Image: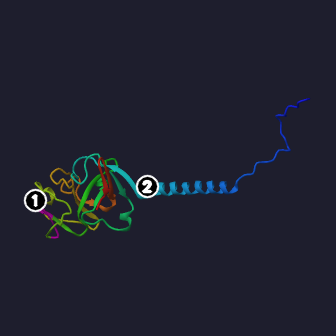
Amino acid sequence: MIFQSRSAGPNFGRRKREINTELVKKVASWVVEIAIVVLIAFAIVYFVGMKSSVVGSSMSPTLEEGDNVLINRVIYKLSEPEANDIIVFMPNGNEKSHYYIKRVIAVPGDTVQIIDGTVYVNGEEFEEEIDAEEIENAQLAEEEIELGEDEYFVLGDNRNNSEDSRYANIGNVKAEYIVGKVWFCTAKGRFGFMN
């Protein structure tokens, strides 16, 4: 008996393996869907939001030093900042400075004054959304301040340890210097949406 060895070369008589076109279509569909979701997520993060860290204790206890916040950069292109919004801005438009995070107290056209440690907007006591301490030093707001058509008066929640609109080096915040609104906070042991 003679044994013939099988040739390692091509065998044109072999049956071709059939490709499962349904499976290929499903995999291709998944790849396209995943790519679209990643692209949309990237666009939302890049164009709509951004992340920043809280520097200092001026917003304590609402935000603590080192907390990470997500900033909505589009909202103020569609609407105006309102009283009690927590905003992120560049002090005096200084792009080399870290971002400042403060609470809006008064909006364009309002008057602001701090009398005996209490904030008054348009002659009425400001309605706080936080349990704010009495202000020890009114600084510029000791006299009534009238805001221009593009100016906002801001304070830190830690009223006696905050560099804010009461001080000449910050002053009233111009609308063009506002980066966006804080809308989410992530911190050790706590996280959540802001007002």
Pointer 2 or 1: first along the chain: 2
At which x and y percent is residue 68? Answer: 32, 49
At which x and y percent is residue 59? Answer: 23, 53
Q: Give, as a three-letter code, the residue at label 1.
A: Gly
At which x and y percent is residue 75? Answer: 37, 64
Q: Is residue 114 left or right of residue 7?
A: left
| SS for dot 2 | helix
Q: Is residue 170 one of those drawn in magenta? A: no
Question: In the rendering, which numbered label is found on residue 45?
Answer: 2
Q: Is residue 119 one of those drawn in magenta? A: yes
Seen from the viewer's position, the closer of residues 43 and 179 is 43
Q: Residue furthest front?
A: 1
Q: Is residue 178 visible?
A: no
At which x and y percent is residue 123? Answer: 14, 70
Seen from the viewer's position, the closer of residues 189 and 168 is 189
Q: CA distance from mark 2 to mark 1?
A: 40 Å
Which residue is the site of mark 1?
Answer: 117
